[in-house]
Amino acid sequence: MVLILTPDIGMLGYIVNTKVGAFTYNLFHHKGLAIAIYLLGVYFQNSQVQLIGIILFSHASLDRFFGYGLKFSDNFKHTHLGNM
């Protein structure tokens, strides 16, 4: 259950600055990347890599459901879904 929260480790980039934080946050919350990781797991028949892809995709989907979007580099609260 706790694994669903692991993509939020991408927020640690905000310790450096908002530009790095937005990049790392968006990297860990990008659905396309999640699908690519899952498909790599399928191709290499690696269930752990598949699980990582599923976790990333699920977390990103939950974030979108709750109104959290991909971040812009100017402010943590400025997302592709609007200002929070």
Image (cartoon, grey):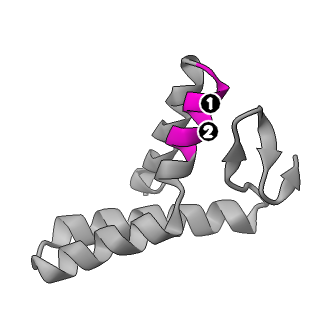
Residue 43 lies in quadrant: bottom left
Q: Is residue 13 above or below residue 63?
A: above
74 vs 51, left or right, is: right
In the image, is residue 33 part of the stretch drawn in magenta? no
| Mark 2, secondary structure of its residue | helix
In the image, is residue 22 part of the stretch drawn in magenta? yes
Point out the residue furthest to the top here. Answer: 16
Using the image as rendered, state which of residue 3 and residue 22 is in the foreground: 22
Whether label 1 touches label 2, CB < 8 Å: yes
* Residue indicated by mark 1: 19
Residue 61 lies in quadrant: bottom right
What's the residue at 53%, 61% (across, down)?
59
Query: How busy is the neighbourhood of tag 2: few (under 14 within 10 Å), some, or many (20 plus)?
Result: many
Q: Amino acid at mark 2?
A: Ala
Q: Which residues are magenta?
A: 17-25
Q: Amino acid at mark 1?
A: Lys
- Mark identifier at residue 35: none
* Residue indicated by mark 2: 22
What's the residue at 48%, 50% (across, down)?
27
Q: Is residue 35 above or below residue 9?
A: below
